[in-house]
Image (cartoon, rainbow, N blue to C red):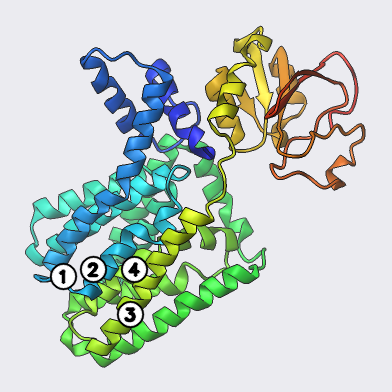
Amino acid sequence: MGNGGYYPLQVRTLLERGELAFPDMPLLFYIDAGIVRLFTIFGTSISNELIINIVKVVDSVSIPLLLLPLYQILKLSKKKNFSFYILSCIALSVLSFQTLNLTSSFQKNSLAITILFFSIAWFVRFLTTRSRKHFIIAVTFFVLIGLTHFGTFTFALLAGTIYLVFRYKKKAVFPIVGLIILALLLIYQFDPVRFSRLLLSWKGLFSKLPNPSQIVLTLTYLIIAFFAIRTFRKFKETFNRTDRAIILTLIALLIIIPFPIIDPQAASRLSAFLFIPVILLLIKFDPIITILSKKLISILLATITLGSISFFLIMRPPADVNKEALEDLYKMQPYMTEPDHTVVVSRHNLEFWVAWALEVDVSQESKFNDTLISEYNEIFIINQIREVDSRIHPENNGKEEKRNHFDEPLIPVNSTLVYSSEYFKLYQYNKNLEVDKK
């Protein structure tokens, strides 16, 4: 269990208080909570175990469900028989490194990607039928993306904007403005903190240099885009105006999104969605590329898929919090004598499991300041142990000392060890001592 603790915590808080523990796009949590409520109709009581199991089930089916809209896209592309080439594309869509990496820790991404495929499928259907009903359904799914995950919504918004420019040129100005206003309103409504960060995000542009892995990633997608451009130019006349706009949009995404000079961190996160334009391009090019090219591409995709599966079976990193460690967290509850006025400082991701087990407020080391100290009667700092001891730093220069695998919070000198086990050490901060907190 990694930051998977975030999801059951949000669902439980929603069930108990009717609100989320942390501001976020809410759709996934409402779906999970709704299913939990559904079980109560049959006499099942709400419990931590039920919530965790429902969260796991929804997570496990989110990505496979994208096969439904992908099948519709294939049908609209007049694919009656699924060749090895098409099957390799389908396999990559659900079993690539990008999609497998979403399991457990990135559940909102998983659901949002599936909704994105539904939006694409209905939009492609609209382009074929020009039915207002199909357009409304496509837009509805687009809005649902925004209610699920910010990153996927950003990707979808960028894709929609680029398509409108290629398809309608100057006439696209007003629809694009409408899309942006809709996006900003959604973000502001459900995550005002993220909205504020978004307005200030331009300050970070061009301020960071990409690392070697990001450069390799960029070059990889640029190479794919290069071959796609060559193929498109060669067979341009075989596509109608709408298909041309779609293909150019997919190619543009491969060029723009992974470009790390603008913002390497944003490029890295959004690049996780680039398997989508790759798959859609391969489907679009199916009727025009040679049999030999299809065979080579199929072998490459099959190799990537098998490699991704093997990686996650063999090399997947261990969970930060296993079942035994979670049970250990529950043992700390007696030390929280004022749970409504208590905060526990922990590293990122662990704080969600701490809040889940102890039912108290949580914070990260970066926010451990005088304001936080004044707001709570009891303050604890937790360190997770794995082959190394927690560190007590009597001076403010402790950050220069090498941190352990978990990058745990520094322990203020005016703290007392109140609980120690194989997995954790829990310290209580003494507010009455005027000593440097770091």
Instruction: Please tell me how crowded label 3 is: few (under 14), some (14-19), or many (20+) other residues with Cα within 10 Å.
Output: some
Q: Is residue 123 visible?
A: no
Classify residue 134 by image quadrant: bottom left
Residue position for label 2: 87
Residue position for label 1: 82
The residue type indicated by label 3 comes to Ile
Q: What residue is at 41 percent from the left and 84 percent from the top?
A: 226
Callouts 2 and 1 close, C-beta under 8 Å: yes
Q: Is residue 68 left or right of residue 297?
A: left
Where is residue 305? Give x, y as percent.
38, 65
N-terminal of the pair, mark 3 or mark 4, is: 4
The residue type indicated by label 2 comes to Leu
**Tag 2, which secondary structure?**
helix
Q: What residue is at 52 percent from the left and 71 percent from the top?
A: 217
Q: CA distance from mark 4 to mark 2?
A: 16 Å
Residue position for label 3: 297
Q: Is residue 358 left or right of residue 285?
A: right
Vertical side of 374 occupied by 114: above or below: below
N-terminal of the pair, mark 4 or mark 2, is: 2
Q: CA distance from mark 2 to mark 3?
A: 11 Å
